[in-house]
Image (cartoon, rainbow, N blue to C red):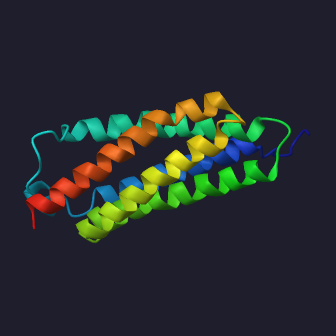
């Protein structure tokens, strides 16, 4: 294959995760003055924690998707799980666009809840295919559950 670029599923997955992270972070830097002016609960982590946690979660999600995709034999369920990963990425970006980009806290709550539910669905559906892939997503599910509650609490504190 000299001179040819070989595109693997793993490279596509990694590029997709990087795209979600970059697009989401683009929205996350919007309207910072508005964000800093919001009332936030005492249990909200410091701002630097969010970037660190999301970096780890995106790495774990990429590894999880690669493990699930590379498990043989692939079945239609494998393809459904990959579609759920894609939906999850869209929901992830949409949360940042709603919350930071458009200052729409209430719709962001629903998006965060759907993001969490899609992560839980992937964990459950992937369990028989790749337990390791499923386990790697547990921190992501926990974080998105926390993010849903945090977004809800911010909406209540700023109603």
Foreground residue among 158 and 117: 117
Which one is in front, 24 or 124? Answer: 124
Side of 36 relative to 148 (left or right): left
Where does residue 23 sit, x and y in percent of width and height? 44, 58
**Residue 86 at x, y percent in the picture:** 60, 57
Q: Residue at x 35, y 64 (%)?
A: 110
Classify residue 142 as left or right of residue 99.
Answer: right
Q: Is residue 64 above or below residue 92?
A: above
Q: Is residue 63 visible in the rendered structure shown here?
A: no
Q: Position of residue 34 (x, y in %)?
A: 14, 63
Residue at the (74%, 53%) spot, across then down: 79
For the residue pair 55 and 75, the one nearer the viewer reads as 75
Percent coordinates x, y for residue 3 in the rendering: 86, 43
Task: Tell me: 9 left or right of 111.
Answer: right
Q: Is residue 55 left or right of residue 119?
A: left
| Vertical comparison of 4 with 98: above or below | above
- In the rendered image, the quadrant that contains the N terminus is top right
The residue lying at 51 percent from left, 53 percent from top is: 118
Question: From the viewer's perspective, is residue 132 above or below residue 48?
Answer: above
Residue at x-position 78% and y-position 46% = 7
Q: Is residue 41 visible to the viewer in this orientation of the structure?
A: yes
């Amino acid at each position: 294959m000299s001179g040819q670029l070989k595109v693997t599923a793993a490279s596509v997955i990694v590029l997709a995760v990087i795209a979600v992270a970059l697009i989401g972070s683009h929205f996350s830097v919007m309207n910072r003055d508005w964000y800093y002016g919001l009332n936030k609960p005492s249990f909200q982590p410091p701002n630097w924690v969010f970037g660190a946690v999301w970096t780890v979660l995106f790495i774990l999600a990429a590894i999880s998707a690669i493990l699930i995709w590379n498990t043989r034999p692939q079945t239609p369920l494998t393809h459904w799980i990959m579609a759920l990963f894609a939906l999850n990425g869209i929901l992830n970006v949409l949360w940042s666009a709603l919350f930071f980009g458009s200052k729409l806290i209430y719709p962001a709550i629903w998006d965060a809840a759907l993001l969490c539910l899609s992560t839980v669905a992937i964990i459950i559906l992937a369990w028989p295919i790749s337990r390791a892939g499923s386990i790697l997503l547990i921190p992501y599910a926990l974080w998105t559950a926390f993010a849903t509650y945090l977004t809800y609490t911010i909406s209540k504190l700023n109603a």
